[in-house]
Amino acid sequence: MKARIFIIAALLAGGFYYATSVARGDWRAFFASRTSTGLPIWSAPEVARSAGLSSDEVNSIDIYKRAHPATVNITSTVYQRNWFMELVPRTGTGSGFFIDDKGHILTNNHVITGGGQGVGKKLTVTLADKSTYTASVLGLDPLNDLALIKIEPRGKFTYLKMGDSDAIQVGQKVLAIGNPFGLDGTLTTGVISSMGRTIQDERGRELEGLLQTDASINQGNSGGPLLDSQGSVIGVNTAILAGPQGMGTTGIGFAMPINKAKTMLDDYQAGRKYSPPRLGVSVVYVVGELAEALGLPQQGGLLVQGVTRGSAAEAAGIRGPRELAIIGNAEIGVGGDLIVALDGKPVDRLDAISRTLSKKRAGDQLEVTLSRGGRNVSLKLTLGAAPAEDRL
């Protein structure tokens, strides 16, 4: 009996000693940290890490690491006189990206000219490492809202490779990098929502053949790269469609296809003056039932809605509409020519003309195949030059 009492007393004493001396009160945390099932009630870092990253996340991270150092912030500064004849600086900001390791940067025309008119325009380029440079303008293409500038390098720059914007498909993943609202190095992702869009710039000029994306593009993103899932540049972020006042943006952004920049860059490299071409027609794309309803071939094409006076189209005899028709809620000019092919390639989208002209210069030849009065007619014409304000 005494032995049994001694054993019980020893166990109690040992437990008390462990709880007060060895565990030093941690027993409370021990029990508090477990549920009734005995498992921790928190998610430890190792649990979160064990899930890993998806292949799409890894792709986005890799592209950002490569493209961020090649994306720059651009500030355009001019000095204007106020009522007291004092010089006051006015600035505009945007983005751009290196296209080679020699300091050449592609951006938007409106980023370069956005500071307004004034005295002593200055362009400042800030790199991802916060170093700053003064840039010079080498070429402008207002018609496509593009500009080429250059800084003098103090070393080699990371640059981006150009993709093929003609191969883009609706639904493919895209990534935009820029400096929205001064927040440098911002990455947004989305998809190509549509192609061949036409919008007006701040001067009322039409920008044709734009890519539409739901990747967020805001003030300061202009001029930055729109990248595909391989990290190649397929567009230059250009504009957004703003929502009603007070409602913010609508999530609709636009980028100029990169192929539209290639002719300008080739001309600069070859020492030629870039002269963007113009055909001189306004069109609407019709196909299928709509084309049949208008008495046109089912395969459709670009129905001419207007011909610019003095243009290559007028000189070649391309005909505009003779009357107006109401189709649904839309008013369409009918009776004019239907463009069914350009340089022998069938027309199958609204931006077919801008895509074709992106590879040409003023003075180049263009073969236009028309459907006129139930038969096809081919015309060869010489492309005219864009208006003076739309040239370099």
Image (cartoon, rainbow, N blue to C red):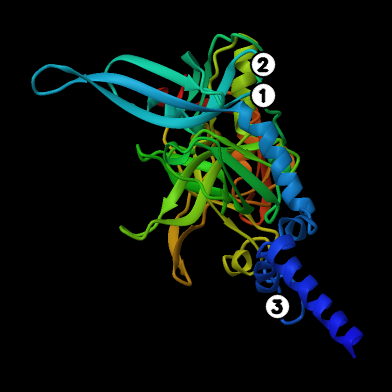
The three-letter code of the residue at mark 1 reads Tyr
> Which residue is the extreme one toward the front?
2
**Secondary structure of the residue carrying numbered label 1:** loop
The three-letter code of the residue at mark 3 reads Thr
- Is 329 positioned to the left or the right of 245 in the image? right
Find residue 174 and name its label.
none
Which residue carries the number 3 mark? 35
**Secondary structure of the residue carrying numbered label 2:** loop
Residue nearest the observer in this picture, 141 or 131: 131
Marks 1/2: CA–CA distance: 6 Å
Asked whether disc 1 touches disc 3, contact meaning CB atoms under 8 Å apart, the reply is no
> Compared to 106, does 318 lie above or below?
below
Q: Residues within 10 Å of mark 2 (few under 14, many from 20)?
A: some
Counting from the top left corner in percent of width and height, residue 169 is at 71, 51
Which residue carries the number 2 mark? 101
Report the mark closest to the observer, 3 or 2: 3
Q: Is residue 296 visible?
A: yes
**Secondary structure of the residue carrying numbered label 3:** loop
Q: Is residue 342 visible?
A: no
Asked which quadrant contains residue 356, the reply is top right
Q: Residue at x 65, y 70 (%)?
A: 28
Which residue carries the number 1 mark? 159
Residue nearest the observer in this picture, 274 or 160: 160
Q: How many marks?
A: 3
Counting from the top left corner in percent of width and height, residue 293 is at 59, 69
Marks 1/3: CA–CA distance: 54 Å
Report the mark closest to the observer, 1 or 3: 3
Q: Earlier in the sequence, mark 1 or mark 3?
A: 3
Q: Residue at x 69, y 30 (%)?
A: 162
